[in-house]
Amino acid sequence: MTNLLSLLIGYLLGSVSFSYLAGKLLKGIDIREHGSGNAGATNTLRVLGKGPGIAVLLLDMLKGVAAVWIGTWLSGSDPLFEVLAGISVIVGHNWPVFFGFRGGKGIATTIGVMATLAFLPALIAGIVAIVSIAITRYVSLGSLLFTALLPIFIWFMVDSREIFALSLLLFVFAWVKHRSNIVKLLKGQENKLGAKKQV
């Protein structure tokens, strides 16, 4: 029963949209009606500025870390439920029950989950993603690279079928949520980091 409770807690924790709350508290707006329309750290950065954007990024990552820790604690370190707790928090972030199931794309929360479950692969994939963002200024490209590289690094570096399966699922999640960004990248129309949207 406590195993299942960890999944519910993970989903509800993920459903707390810090991007939405930042928009309401700082500007009295629904962040989903501005910028890219995404309730995530990058859109928060564009619409509200660097400070709120960084805060949302860190808080969204911490959601992922906390959900896995809770899953570990309540399941007695059962690898399956650690992974399921990670899935639950990302599903909550992407489709939050508190905000009409309109959430973000889950990358920051994915970073938190995967850094907790597979630190070294997540670190290497994260470095590649950061370098790509620094060079191209396309956050979406970095996010796509991060989720694409994770399964490869985990396959070679982590002896866990559960974590490898999770990385494949999160790859699918990310690429489906970024499908409009992929089209824009291919057309050369994607927004670059630093292109601030005015409220």
Image (cartoon, rainbow, N blue to C red):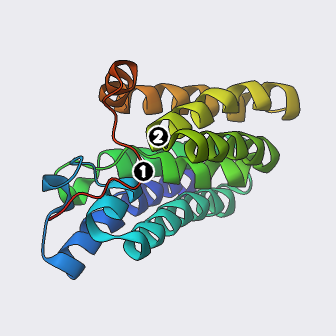
Residue 17 visible to an observer of this rendering? no
Q: Residue at x 61, y 61 (%)?
A: 65
Q: Residue at x 33, y 19 (%)?
A: 187
Q: Residue at x 29, y 58 (%)?
A: 196
Give residue 48's quadrant in the image: bottom left
Q: Which residue is mark 1?
A: 193
Q: Nearer the viewer, residue 128 or 76?
A: 128
| Left or right of 195 on screen, residue 148 | right
- Say whether marks 2 and 1 touch (CB < 8 Å): yes
Query: Picture coordinates of residue 90 (x, y %)?
Result: 45, 47
The kind of secondary structure element at disc 2 is loop
- Dot 2 crowding, Cα within 10 Å, few <14, some 14–19, many 20+: many
Query: Picture coordinates of residue 43 (x, y %)?
Result: 32, 55
Query: Picture coordinates of residue 174 (x, y %)?
Result: 46, 33
Q: Nearer the viewer, residue 123 or 110?
A: 123
Query: Picture coordinates of residue 110 (x, y %)?
Result: 54, 47
Q: Nearer the viewer, residue 48 or 63?
A: 48
Q: Is residue 117 above or below residue 184?
A: below
| Left or right of 61 on screen, residue 165 | right
Q: CA distance from mark 2 to mark 1?
A: 6 Å
Q: Which residue is mark 2?
A: 138
Q: Amino acid at mark 1?
A: Leu
Q: How many marks?
A: 2
Give residue 41's quadrant in the image: bottom left
Q: Residue at x 34, y 34 (%)?
A: 190
Q: Is residue 191 above or below residue 22?
A: above
Mark nearer the N terminus (2 vs 1): 2
Q: Nearer the viewer, residue 190 or 117?
A: 190
